[in-house]
Image: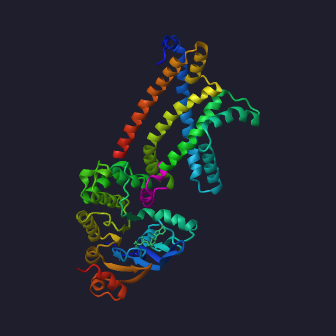
Amino acid sequence: MFRYTFRWDTVWNNFDFLMSGLQMTLLLSVITLVLAMLLGLVLALLDMAKYAPLRWVGVGFGEVIRNTPILVQLLWVYYVLPIVFGIRIEAFTALVVGLSVYQAAFISEVYRSGIQAVPKGHREAAQVLGLTPVQSFRRIVLPQAIRMTLPPLASNFVQLIKFSSLGAVISVNEITRRGMELSASTFRPLEIFTFIAVVYFFICWPLAMGIRLWERRLLAQ
Amino acid sequence: MTSPSPRDELPIISADGVSKSFGDNRVLNKVSLDVKTRDVVCVIGPSGSGKTTLLRCLAMLEIPSDGRIVMQGTTISTPAPDATVRKAARAVRPEIGMVFQHFNLWPHRTVLENVIEAPLLVKRTPRADAIATAEALLDKVGLADKRDAYPARLSGGQQQRVAIARALAMSPKVMLFDEPTSALDPELRREVLAVMRQLAAEGMTMLVVTHEMGFARHVGSRVVFMDRGEIVEEGAPAAFFSAPKTERAQRFLQQFED
Ligand SMILES: Nc1ncnc2c1ncn2[C@@H]1O[C@H](COP(=O)(O)OP(=O)(O)O)[C@@H](O)[C@H]1O
């Protein structure tokens, strides 16, 4: 064992500073989830489009995003996009764009499997009764698909909270970045990063447990 | 009773030279069949002979590769439907009721909601009227007390009876049944068959794909025997079951004798 004098007061004295970072983390996660859900729906519709070129765009985009590292994508959005398009992108915007595009590629799969999990017979029953395809999608397919996609969407939110820590790399002031700054000025990484890990854990863990219970109840029905 | 107009004498629904292929697999080969008012046509035959596909063509769930589907003189389905045909199809769709082998009730809707959905959305029936009709129909199939249950809470036989009520709620001119008891345990079949028998007695025009030889024999007004995508033999049940003319029908019926 090493001898070490814990200085937890480093954390308490800078509690507000760290919590402002947590606020940013949660704000980022919520904004990103909303954007990713919308963009994911667009991608899912592209994937299922009747017109083949639209499908290629959707599928190709999804494959590229899912098969490259999120960190590289973030760096690409932050450093390369401005060069290519000659625009200025703030770190916050870059992070929101990068994370939501990344998450959308996964969420579109969630939507797609939710929609495809609704048995064809349910749509056929609607069809023979004279419901239009739009009525059938809205009243029969979507309500069932949404129920199945809610737990995976919630899991995506947990992932987003964790991924948002990557913002530290491009200096977005979320909680991990705050920790790095504080650690640089106080030389107390042990207390600071332990505290931050605990904060992440006590946000993500109850969410994950809740989702698991929720999923089990849906399955039981 | 009013005297029948010429329109009433036309078959309610007909397949006219209908063929259907899935890829290279020719499942129906120039099948023609008329279902007239109050007919209870039972379609029987070995599995894979195209019975379900014929029914699905009549229900406009499959588009025929050749031939056409006609409802009371109006063409409603062809291999390449033009605007007139598509319009006719939309208009008559609610008049063709269909009951599936696997019920296909909507699990997120209660029994009552399953039954009133199409009247509300398609016929724009006022809600109170739709509910009154639905309650009467549920009573008729013996499930008035299950009005607010979700389908998952019902037995297969009960689900199928709800599915029948749901189809009847659109006041169809013909009811198509696709092996309605095949997915059920033997002891649950009877309650579904009883409802179908009652419908037949009330004069509903029906086409039933079935393996229930007893039903075909005692309730059917006509039996159609299919094999390998063709209608091989058809006739009155009594004659067909006691003295089938074709060898294929004879062989098929042998397996039901004990
Ligand atoms: N959607 C489909 N795609 C490809 N083949 C099909 C499809 N539907 C039915 N078939 C084929 O058509 C044949 C006849 O099937 P079906 O009409 O269900 O016969 P039956 O009802 O007499 O058992 C079977 O060989 C089946 O595999």
Q: In this view, does B209 lie to the left or right of A199?
A: left
Where residue B112 appears, as percent x and y from the top left, is 32, 51
Which residue sits at x=31%, y=83%?
B236
B24 to A146, vertically: above or below:
below
Q: In this view, does B217 lie to the left or right of A211?
A: left
Numbered disc total: 0
- Asked if one can make out residue A221 in the rendered structure from this viewpoint, the answer is no
A135 to A69, vertically: above or below:
below
Task: Answer with the quarter of the image where residue A78 lies.
Answer: top right
Where residue A114 appears, as percent x and y from the top left, is 47, 48
Which residue sits at x=58%, y=51%?
A47
Along the line of sight, which residue is nearer the eye, A97 or A205? Answer: A205
Q: Residue at the front extreme? A: A1
Where residue A70 appears, as percent x and y from the top left, is 60, 37
Residue A40 drawn in magenta: no
- Asked if one can make out residue A195 in the rendered structure from this viewpoint, the answer is yes
Where residue A63 appears, as percent x and y from the top left, is 61, 48
Q: Quadrant of ligand 1?
A: bottom left
B143 to B49, vertically: above or below:
above
B59 to A58, vertically: above or below:
below
Task: Answer with the quarter of the image where residue A188 lies.
Answer: top right
Which residue sits at x=24%, y=58%?
B142
Quadrant where the C terminus of chain B lies?
bottom left
Task: Answer with the quarter of the image where residue A38 lies.
Answer: top right
In the image, which residues are magenta? A114-132
Q: In this view, does B252 lie to the left or right of B82?
A: left
